[in-house]
Amino acid sequence: TTDMDYLEFPLLLRFSPQLGGPLSPHVAAGPAFSFVLNCRVSNRLRASIIDPFTGEQVMVDDDESEECEEDVFKTFDFGVMAGAGLAFAVSPSWSLTLDLTYNHGLSSIIKVDDDLVELSDDTENRTFAFMAGVAFRFR
């Protein structure tokens, strides 16, 4: 398992139709630029084997975790992001918001291009995010 933490900078164009009421829907889309903050590779091995000398069953349970090698993964990712949400106006100056976004990376996050490494076609980032927040209107 590879766990990568990113600092993401989305640049979204947002459309919010004015429906006249406290509930306001919105949609947004645009590019997203991401920078890797942390990367860890974890391996877990669980097995039950028969010892060839004693004939006894031996349980193997091994966990390993280490930092990613710098020459394997890219430190920058570019993708497109789209989402939708609702804002509930509590007062004229602030509202509560709920959003669901999807980010699809457009390039492989793998840096190596070697005949010894077999890569699948599925090495792009894909993320869903659910966000709840408070929005303030500055005039």
Image (cartoon, grey):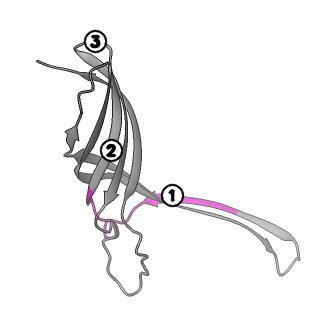
Residue type marked 1: Ser
Percent coordinates x, y for residue 12 in the rendering: 21, 44
Tag in front: 3 or 1 = 3
Q: Tell me what residue is drawn at x 22 percent, y 14 percent.
A: 93
Q: Which residues are the magenta region?
A: 61-79
SS of the residue at dot 1? strand
Q: What residue did someone put label 2 on?
A: 83
Report how far apart the C-alphas of labels 2 and 1 lie in the structure.
34 Å
Residue type marked 3: Ser
Q: What residue did someone put label 3 on?
A: 91
Q: Quadrant of residue 79?
A: bottom left
In the picture provided, is 60 more to the left or to the right than 24? right
Residue type marked 2: Gly
Residue closest to the far left? 139
SS of the residue at dot 3? loop
In the picture provided, is 32 more to the left or to the right than 58? left
Queried whether the magenta region covers residue 12, the answer comes back as: no
Which of 132/92 is in front? 92
Q: How many marks?
A: 3
Percent coordinates x, y for residue 14 in the rendering: 21, 40
Report how far apart the C-alphas of labels 3 and 1 lie in the structure.
49 Å
